[in-house]
Amino acid sequence: MQVGCPQNQYFRPSVPFRQSISGGLQDGTVLVVSGSASHCGDSFAVNFQCEHCSPAENIAFHFNPRFSESCVVCNTKERNSWGREERKHEMPFHKGHHFEIRVLISHHCYKVSVNGNHFLEYNHRIPLHRVNTLEITGSVDLENVHFQGAGGFAPPFQPTPCPPGGMYNPYPTPPFQPPCQQCPVPYHSPLLGGCFPSKVITISGSVPHHAKRFHVDLKFHGGTAFHLNPRLDENAVVRNSYLCNQWGSEERGGPMPFSKGQNFMIMITCEHHCFSVTVNGQHLFNYNHRVPNVQQIDHLEVEGDVVLQYVQA
């Protein structure tokens, strides 16, 4: 579910779509592509390229659903030569039907989910730092293309010069700005498809000057699988789970990235063994799963002293 005014976003762009990736790709970046496969035509492709030109001589990751072969082909092209194909003989796309592709970039592979379900992983053959262009071609009608996290078409947080005698911070805390549109607080939303590896939840907002604490909860029928609780009155970010009608052992430690009167962006990435939490582009901590079946986690809740600008789950 998407609310508010996201950044790095293109609505209903024309195809072929080709755009530079400002700042390149980084571990934790997520590409979201939604649209529908055209009734005519047999394939489309999402390409992570190494230069802003077409046809590209170097494509780090080629994701290519082929309806005529009822499979999805992945490959890499280097020096204008294609490598060994990796085929997934499963077709999650249907002509004329809506889809959502999410590509989570990790340090060793691209993790792809389609319509809320983990679909495949593709190991890097070309280093991430060489990727600088996104291209989408073929028989597809695009509704929305955007990046979440570090990198993207227009990164929300730009580095600032190192102050004299100070330490350089590549992800400075953004200054307070009035929200473009406020989401209601308390905020409640279903998590369509539940959680799964590569699922990313993005929450951006601001901390009021009077704030003491707020929380983000990932819940299921039996309790709260993950409770993220910034406590400005204690200068701590508390993590916990509420299972079998009782709270578990708290996890604390690490920096306090939230400040009164400042904006923030939280990214919660569901991985195989944990939730990985990033705030303002910096990895904050991992929280190991205490609920074995993460797909049953089906509800997002945000409450407390917080102003919400944008939520995507």
Image (tube, rainbow, N blue to C red):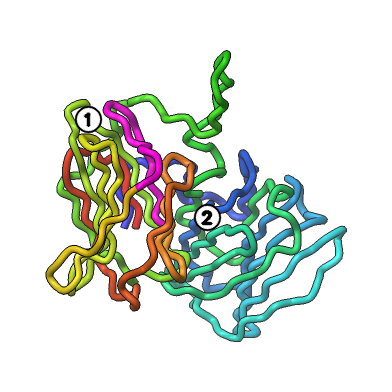
Q: Is residue 115 magenta?
A: no
133 left or right of 38 in image: right
Q: CA distance from mark 1 to mark 2?
A: 30 Å
Q: Position of residue 195 (x, y in %)?
A: 36, 69
**In the rendering, which numbered label is found on residue 273?**
none
Residue range of the region highlighted in magenta in the rendering = 253-268
Query: Which one is in front, 88 or 128?
Result: 128
Determine whether the residue tagged by mark 1 lies in a helix, strand or loop: loop
**Residue placed at 64% from the left, 44% from the top?**
24
Q: Earlier in the sequence, mark 1 or mark 2?
A: 2
Residue behind mark 1: 208
Quadrant for residue 177, please give it: top left
Secondary structure beneath dot 2 equals: strand
- According to the picture, the residue beneath numbered tag 2 turns out to be 31
Percent position (x, y) of residue 286? 42, 57
Q: Nearer the viewer, residue 153 or 299?
A: 299
